[in-house]
Image (tube, grey):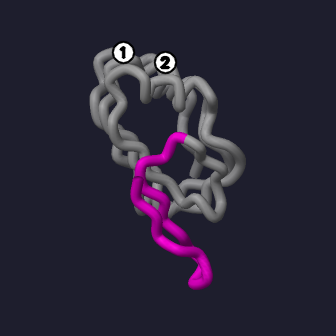
Amino acid sequence: GVIPTELGNLESLEKLRLHFNFLNETIPTELGLLYNMTELRLENNTLTGDMPSLVCELTSGRLEEVEADCDEVSCDCCTTCWCLEEECEFRSY
């Protein structure tokens, strides 16, 4: 499945935990509208592309934890990187 863009309308959402959900395609830019979000967990899916810059900008506010599969998603703001491939190393910042 895909991450619905409508999640960006949930203005009071603080934690978005979508790990282990068989999600694919890209991460919607609309998640960057979740200004109250403190935690975003997207690891262990098959998402691809870049972490949207609007999401990364949230790390200067309330967003403290961002986790993704960094071997599939290019993520400059991830606090923890998970890897689906054996040769990829787990990283935590």
The residue drawn where x is 59% and y is 75% is 88
**Most extreme residue toward the front, as rendered?**
93
- Residue 33, how many percent across, how many down? 49, 18
Q: Is residue 50 left or right of residue 79?
A: right
Q: Which residue is mark 2?
A: 33
Foreground of the two, 42 or 56? 56
Which residue does the image show at 33% across and 36% down from the upper left? 64
- Part of the protein shown in magenta: 77-93
The crowd level at tag 2 (other Cα within 10 Å; few <14, some 14-19, many 20+) is some
Image point (64%, 53%), residue name? 73
Q: Estimate the x, y position of residue 18 in percent, counting from the top left.
A: 40, 49
Residue 5 rendering spot, x and y as whole percentages: 57, 28
Amino acid type, residue under disc 2 in the picture: Leu
Residue 11 bears which disc, if any? 1
Q: CA distance from mark 2 to mark 1?
A: 7 Å
Nearer to the camera, 34 or 83? 83
Looking at the image, is mark 2 or mark 1 earlier in the sequence? 1
